[in-house]
Amino acid sequence: MRTLIAFVMFVVMASSATDTVAQAVTETRHQPAGQIGKTKVIGWREQIILPEFGSTHLDAKIDTGARTSALHAVDLAAEIRNGEEWVSFHVPYLGEQRSVRHSAKIFDRRKIRNTSGIAQVRYVIKTTLVLGVRQWQIEVSLADREKMKHDIILGRTAVRDQGLLVDPAKSYLAGAPVSDAPGKPPWRP
């Protein structure tokens, strides 16, 4: 009797899953490329802008295995401004003079594991991210990523509420980042 009940439950669940997949396939056929329903498909790497730091286009790796995003920043110095903690730092953009410093209010300090699995306490700031035509606030930790291929990784908390789906087989699906910041030329892959 238990076997029969288990079998019936399996058949019901399987047919329900099949109907859901069939519905998704049908809906997808009528969607523009890079779109599934209301979900925007992005690649495992994308070009972004961080306009608050005057960034030119950065090559970002979308890393859903990482919880928190990480930006390559060096020469970090914490300070108190009007009773609030701030951090100043340098983001070594290609061709930028090292004398250009950026600063941001410290949002948090977190223990974050690096790529080797070693926990580090890092400053976390909030900043605006521009990806394609979308822009939103993200939390990003500051870390020395000099030995890493990408200047920034976008962790899952940066993308989870944005209706984005990552295609690990594709790159640069979001298109060139569109920023209101003056003097930002369009990026071309």
Image (cartoon, grey):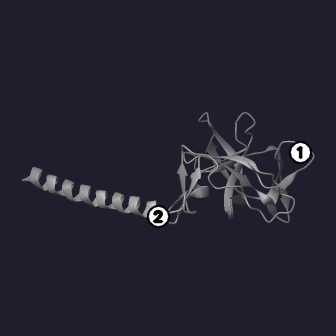
Residue 113: horizontal and vertical position, in percent? 61, 41
First-in-chain label (2 vs 1) = 2
Residue 177: horizontal and vertical position, in percent? 72, 57
Mark seen at residue 76: none
Q: Nearer the viewer, residue 185 or 7?
A: 185
Vertical position of residue 40 compared to residue 166: above or below = below
Judged from the image, the secondary structure of the residue bearing numbered disc 2 is loop
For label 1, the residue is: 96
Residue 138 visible (yes or no):
yes
At horizontal 62% and vertical 52% (from top left) the residue drawn is 173
For label 2, the residue is: 30
Q: Is residue 88 left or right of residue 6?
A: right
Vertical position of residue 55 compared to residue 181: above or below = above
Residue 127 visible (yes or no):
no
Task: Between label 2 and label 1, give the one nearer the viewer.
Answer: 2
Residue most extreme to the front: 30
Residue type at mark 1: give it.
Glu
**What is the distance, in whole Å, between disc 2 and disc 1 at their CAs?**
45 Å
Residue type at mark 2: give it.
His
Label 1 crowding class (10 Å Cα cut-off): few <14, some 14-19, many 20+? few
Vertical position of residue 107 compared to residue 171: above or below = below
Q: Is residue 172 left or right of residue 103?
A: left
Label 2 crowding class (10 Å Cα cut-off): few <14, some 14-19, many 20+? few
Judged from the image, the secondary structure of the residue bearing numbered disc 1 is loop
- Determine which quarter of the picture holds residue 169: top right
At horizontal 79% and vertical 66% (from top left) the residue drawn is 180
Residue 20: horizontal and vertical position, in percent? 34, 61
Residue 94: horizontal and vertical position, in percent? 84, 42
Q: How many marks?
A: 2
